[in-house]
Image: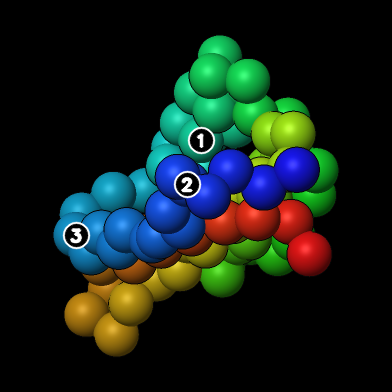
Amino acid sequence: HRNPEFRSGWQEYRGPGRMEEVAAFYRNTLPVHGWSLASEEGKDPAKLTFTKKSERCVTEIATADDLKLSVRVTIGYKD
C-alpha cells in the first residue's frame, strides 16, 4: 500500500570523512529507526540498501575526485 502523502527524495553530502566510519554510522543508525539492512555491496564505492515496510533506502558512499567522500542517500518505494 503506497501512501500518497509520501515524497521520495535524495540527499547528497560531499566532504571529509572515512569510508568505514560513514558506512558504520548508517549500519548502526538506520536500524534504530526501523530500517533493516537488506544488502551491502562493494568497498569503494560502497552501497548499503535498507528496507522498511514498502520503502527502500539506498546509501552510496564513494571517494570523490578531490579525495573527499561523496555520500548519497535515496529513499523511495520498493519496486
Disc number for residue 6: 2
Instruction: Give the colour scheme shown.
Output: rainbow
CB contact under 8 Å: marks 1 and 2? no
Q: Measure the alpha-carbon separation of dots 2 and 3.
A: 29 Å
Which residue was labeled with disc 1?
A: 26
Of the numbered discs 2 and 3, the one sitting upstream in the chain is 2
Q: Measure the alpha-carbon separation of dots 1 and 3.
A: 16 Å
Residue drawn at (22%, 80%) of the image: 66
CB contact under 8 Å: marks 1 and 3? no
Q: Is residue 52 left or right of residue 12?
A: right
Disc number for residue 15: 3
Q: Measure the alpha-carbon separation of dots 1 and 2.
A: 22 Å
**Element at badge 1?**
helix
CB contact under 8 Å: marks 2 and 3? no
Closer to us: 20 or 11: 11
Work out which quarter of the rendered image holds the C terminus and state it. Answer: bottom right
Q: Is residue 17 above or below residue 33?
A: below
- The x, y position of residue 31, in whole percent, is 62, 21
- Tell me which amino acid carries mark 2: Phe
**Res 19 visible:** no
Residue drawn at (39%, 71%) of the image: 63
